[in-house]
């Protein structure tokens, strides 16, 4: 709502806009110069009278002090130096090296309770902008901007970022980093004066990218501590920064990262940014629940139970034969698998990873009758059929590369540095796009393929449209989005997984068009505990691929217990990565029991609230999923290492209804006990209230390292 009533005759009233929804309030001071600034983003305001909103806006206005501007600068939505901002500008650009100054001013606004469209203009710079703010149904703050060149000469955009001011007491930063096989590893820093900058220049977010940039009160955890975070919903190069100024402003900013000359707006042309999305909470779990709840409300969100999936990669690698794969399919069906995915090695010339990418035809030397015999066998066993593809990539040793070297992304005559013996196709090249789209449509038309495992096994380096050509990451990313949308539109029911050397392309831009992500190429349960916890800050668990692994882990060589591996995979989209034909009947029976349990709880996983417990003793991990109506929950109590306390002290089980009583029971875990007596509550009809489970807790079982116990909690009537 707009407000104009003043407090005194000497102080003109400030125009204020209040957006609110899903437990979040966003208050904008419309009189901030040169255009509006956010004065509050966070807790929903119960007193939102005009007087209160005016007072909030007035309370945020800085005083003029010695050495400062006569009108102190504010962290407006799109900052610039012409507006007085001396930190990182939100918008930078120029016209052939000149006309670099920008000062966007508010021209018009249209708003309702939860969204606003702000028209901004700089007539001197010949630019206009439409800034869209929306508070989603779960309280996420979405920002997006469309910048238009209203002049008669080209305008080069160097950067375009959107600002999310955070409370001044948010003095600790959390982000994630990593590498292949260890994505989304958390790191914390003091939020000191200056700029903390995280950039992705890999043409995809990258294994080392931060999924969010968060700032909160010191010591914030998953359960408590006010924290705000920003995510860029974009699958190409991007930038996130946290900036604290000596002028009393703290801000999180995000947007695309443009290569030199990548965005040049012709007269009349426009550029629309990706959504930059902010969440907040009393603890990281509440912050994550806003992402999960809103994402689940989408019409395109996977609605049916997530099929138990077996992927063939770690079972057979490139060793494809009909007999071996039908035997594997038989073993998969016997343990309850519902989707069988044929991984790399099925197409022309693909006997290892040095050749064949781009030649998307079934290799007749391996499959003389095509894939039909295998597909039919899989379908007869009651499973869906899925196929691995890597459509954006090409091996130089391929018919495609030899015929069309001009389709390869490059900025020089020589090719970019090689990675995994492959280069990247320019999907923004019309002919390359048409070829790839045509081959994928042909495969989907010929075979009843329910699922594509869409891989992307290298970063984009020096990615241009050809020697001396223009930078191409942005156009390639938009072409990828168009291709995914086209395939989904033409093949209703098709599901697609985003895999990129494991978890190197995890963002809400790609997840708007796919049905799950491959969380990491590592299936080591110890590494997965960390990876899955922090991937879950944004990604709902049912969209995170979590697979049971073989006893000796492919990526680490660690020997792991079957029950431990299965328990760590429970709270996601469950699958198997294992040559089941090499297992005995007893092992397959144990796997089948875990598969059956995963099927039983997957409705809970797909709709419930994730819980990560803070302050556990080092060596113990406690996490779970609680039903939205708090009628049931499943938790895992995992021994990651030996503990100093022996037996360990009590652990809390938070997140339940404090006033309800819950029966607690063990449903899975190690056989026998590492302790020398039974655990009393396991042999007793243990019933406790949610308040007691949170405040007092219970003794976890004594377990050897790398073991996990699964407990269920069911509300009693």
Image (spheres, rainbow, N blue to C red):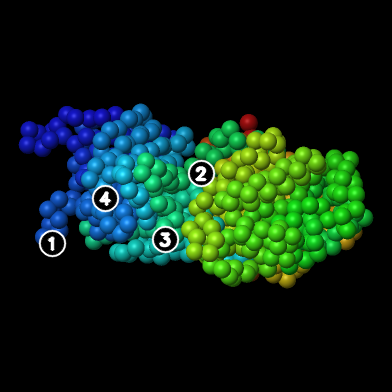
- The CA span between labels 2 and 3 is 33 Å
Tell me, yes or no, if residue 102 can be seen here: yes
Q: Quadrant of the N terminus?
A: top left
- Seen at 88% across and 58% down, the residue is 365
The mark nearer the N terminus, 1 or 3, is 1
Q: Residue furthest left?
A: 10
- Crowd tier of the residue under label 4, counting other residues whose Cα lies within 10 Å: few below 14, some 14–19, many 20 or above: many
State the mark number for residue 291.
2
Q: Nearer the viewer, mark 2 or mark 3?
A: 3
The mark nearer the N terminus, 4 or 2, is 4
Query: What residue is disc 1 on?
Result: 67
Q: Nearer the viewer, mark 1 or mark 3?
A: 3
* Element type at mark 3: loop
The mark nearer the N terminus, 2 or 1, is 1
The mark nearer the N terminus, 1 or 4, is 1
Query: What residue is disc 3 on?
Result: 260
- The CA span between labels 1 and 4 is 24 Å
In the image, is 96 to the left or to the right of 716?
Answer: left
Disc 4 to disc 2: CB gap under 8 Å? no
Query: Where is residue 686, by image quadrant?
Result: top right
In the image, is 446 to the left or to the right of 118?
Answer: right
- Seen at 63% across and 39% down, the residue is 486
- Crowd tier of the residue under label 2, counting other residues whose Cα lies within 10 Å: few below 14, some 14–19, many 20 or above: many
- Seen at 28% across and 33% down, the residue is 108
- Seen at 56% across and 50% down, the residue is 428
Q: Quadrant of the C terminus?
A: top right
């Amino acid at each position: 709502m707009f407000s104009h009533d003043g407090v005194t005759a000497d102080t003109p009233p400030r125009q204020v806009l209040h957006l609110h929804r899903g437990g979040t309030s966003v208050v904008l001071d419309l009189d901030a110069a040169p255009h509006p600034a956010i004065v509050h983003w966070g807790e929903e305001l119960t007193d939102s009278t005009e007087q209160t909103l005016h007072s909030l806006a007035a309370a945020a206005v800085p005083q003029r002090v010695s050495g400062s501007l006569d009108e102190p600068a504010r962290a407006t939505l799109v900052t610039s130096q012409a507006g007085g901002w001396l930190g990182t500008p939100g918008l930078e650009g120029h016209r052939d090296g000149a006309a670099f100054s920008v000062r966007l001013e508010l021209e018009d606004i249209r708003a309702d309770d939860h969204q606003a469209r702000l028209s901004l203009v700089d007539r001197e710079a010949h630019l206009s902008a439409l800034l869209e703010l929306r508070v989603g149904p779960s309280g996420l703050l979405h920002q997006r901007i469309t910048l238009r060149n209203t002049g008669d000469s080209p305008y080069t955009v160097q950067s375009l970022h959107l600002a999310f001011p955070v409370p001044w007491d948010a003095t600790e930063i959390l982000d994630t980093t990593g590498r292949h096989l260890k994505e989304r590893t958390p790191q914390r820093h003091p939020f000191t004066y200056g700029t903390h900058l995280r950039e992705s220049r890999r043409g995809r977010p990258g294994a080392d990218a931060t999924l969010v940039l968060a700032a909160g009160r010191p010591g914030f955890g998953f359960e408590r501590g006010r924290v705000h975070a920003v995510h860029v919903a974009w699958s190409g190069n991007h930038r996130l920064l946290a900036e604290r100024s000596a002028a009393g402003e703290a801000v999180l900013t995000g947007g695309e990262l443009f290569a030199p000359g990548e965005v040049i707006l012709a007269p009349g042309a426009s550029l629309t940014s990706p959504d930059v999305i902010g969440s907040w909470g009393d603890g990281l779990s509440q912050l994550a629940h806003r992402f999960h709840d809103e994402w689940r409300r989408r019409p395109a969100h996977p609605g049916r139970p997530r099929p138990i999936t077996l992927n063939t990669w770690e079972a057979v690698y490139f060793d494809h034969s009909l007999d071996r794969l039908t035997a594997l399919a038989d073993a998969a069906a016997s343990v309850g698998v519902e989707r069988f995915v044929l991984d790399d090695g099925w197409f022309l010339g693909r006997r290892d990873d040095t050749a064949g990418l781009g030649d998307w035809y079934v290799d007749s030397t391996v499959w003389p009758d095509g894939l039909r015999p295998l597909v039919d066998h899989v379908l007869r066993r009651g499973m869906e059929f899925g196929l691995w593809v890597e459509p954006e990539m090409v091996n130089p040793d391929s018919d495609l590369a030899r015929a069309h070297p001009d389709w390869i992304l490059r900025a020089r005559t020589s090719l970019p540095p090689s990675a995994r013996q492959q280069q990247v196709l320019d999907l923004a090249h019309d002919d390359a796009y048409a070829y790839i789209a045509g081959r994928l449509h042909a495969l989907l038309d010929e075979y009843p393929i329910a699922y594509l495992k869409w891989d992307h096994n290298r970063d984009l380096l020096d990615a241009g449209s050809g020697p001396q050509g223009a930078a191409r990451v942005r156009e390639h990313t938009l072409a990828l989005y168009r291709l995914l949308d086209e395939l989904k539109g033409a093949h209703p029911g098709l599901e697609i997984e985003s895999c990129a050397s494991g978890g190197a392309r995890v963002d809400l831009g790609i997840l708007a068009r796919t049905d799950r992500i491959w969380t990491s190429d590592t299936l080591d349960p110890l590494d997965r505990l960390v990876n899955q916890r922090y991937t879950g800050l944004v990604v709902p668990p049912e969209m995170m691929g979590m697979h049971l692994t073989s006893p000796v882990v492919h990526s680490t060589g660690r020997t792991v217990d079957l029950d431990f591996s299965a328990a760590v995979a429970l709270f996601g989209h469950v699958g198997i990565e294992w040559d089941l034909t090499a297992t005995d009947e007893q092992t397959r029976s144990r796997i089948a029991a875990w598969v059956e349990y995963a099927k039983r709880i997957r409705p809970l996983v797909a709709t419930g609230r994730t819980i990560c417990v803070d302050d556990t003793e080092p060596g113990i991990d406690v996490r779970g999923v609680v039903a939205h109506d708090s009628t049931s929950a499943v938790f895992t109590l995992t021994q990651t290492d030996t503990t100093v306390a022996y037996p360990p002290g009590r652990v809390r089980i938070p997140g339940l209804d404090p006033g309800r009583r819950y029966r607690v029971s063990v449903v899975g875990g190690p056989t026998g006990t590492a302790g020398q007596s039974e655990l009393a509550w396991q042999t007793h009809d243990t019933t406790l209230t949610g308040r007691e489970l949170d405040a007092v807790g219970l003794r976890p079982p004594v377990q050897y390292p790398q073991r996990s116990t699964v407990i269920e909690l069911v509300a009693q009537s």
